[in-house]
Image (cartoon, rainbow, N blue to C red):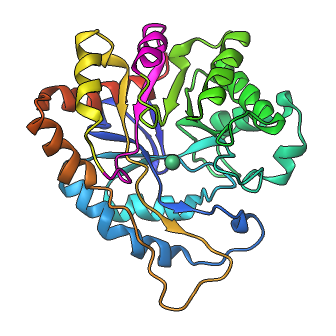
Amino acid sequence: MINTVLGPISEDDLGVTLMHEHILVDLEGINMVKKTYTTDEVVDCVLPYLIDVKNKGCSTIVEATPNGLGRDLEVLKGCAEKSGLNIITCTGAWDGFNVKGKTVPKDIKEKSVDEIASVWIKEFEEGIDETAIKPGFIKMALGDEGEVFPLQEKLLRAAIKTSLDTGFRIQCHVWSKPSVRRTFDILREEKLPFDNFIWVHADVRMDFPLIYEVAKEGMWIEFDGIAGAKSYKKYPPVIKKMSDENIISKLLFGQDSGSFKIKENKEENETQNIRPYATFFDKFVPYCVKEGIDQELIDKVITENSKRVLTLK
Ligand SMILES: [Zn+2]
């Protein structure tokens, strides 16, 4: 069974699944102090984009926004009910860009590795915040400033412990070269099977030798900069190589699309600039097919690979 915000579903009902999207994002950690929006305001804003991607064949969206970055179960439930999409939420913590802990809940920051892991494991076992809603994966973001800071290392080790205990996979945003190296060293040190780890934003550097090396060891490779990409030129050659080298079964697609952004001070008439959820179908797939990638191969990645990575071993 797969956990969605409206309850568990059969893995056979996942259908076409995009692995990395956002509905509500709060880069300033405002949500943890006060709520500056209404549920309806957010749902009304993103719903047309969700309905559009549903009409284009998508059935499931993996919502990669952990607690602190703007995970809001009421919003996610409203979006799932009104759009008919399956929406999968996550546990974990996000400390990307240069936010330096701003989006990590204060009580999590103060806890030890074991204590953090037990909070996250409890969400998988009992549900999030007294609800019956359970996450479907663990989200992490770290290392964007060229090193893995102590807080980020602690969170990563807690994520690894949670993954080893529950079997759920870690979706980890990491792209800076030294941080990628350090992260993979920590995985090895903690003996996390690479199959439990999704390398988010592997398409930032498109380092094929490294992609090949870790995918051969079982790691999932996620190409998910699609919503914000100015050009798709770098994608088809690497997808072809992954297919030729028999590692295509480890590829995942997401877009980093969305999202409604929470700000401390909203300017009047400010628009949200949502990156459409349907970009994958409107632009990316036609481009790849034109460049010689089989539609069948893309379909396999967004159905079978997504299903395998979301299913517990
Ligand atoms: Zn993201």
Direction from residue 286 to residue 87 in the image, left or right: right
Q: In the image, what residue occupies the spot 68% across and 77% down?
A: 264
Q: State the residue lying farthest toward the bottom.
A: 268
Q: Nearer the viewer, residue 170 or 235?
A: 235
Residue 158 seen from this side: yes
Find the magenta span and give its range. 208-230
Whether residue 15 sits left or right of residue 189 in the image: it is left
Q: Where does residue 98 sit, x and y in percent of width and height?
A: 70, 52
On-image quarter of the N terminus: top left
Q: Quadrant of residue 293?
A: top left
Q: Is residue 223 magenta?
A: yes
- Residue nearest the viewer, comparing 11 with 263: 263
Q: Quadrant of residue 9 in the image?
A: top left
Residue appearing at x 48%, y 7% in the figure: 217
Q: Position of residue 103 (x, y in %)?
A: 72, 55
- State whether residue 118 appears in this view: no
Residue 100 in the image: above or below residue 296:
below
Q: Could you say which is closer to the camera, residue 271 or residue 305? A: 271
72 vs 259, nearest the viewer: 259
Task: Decide: is 1 above or below 285.
Answer: above
Q: Is residue 114 above or below residue 3?
A: above
Q: Position of residue 212 (x, y in %)?
A: 41, 13
**Left or right, residue 61 beside residue 298:** right
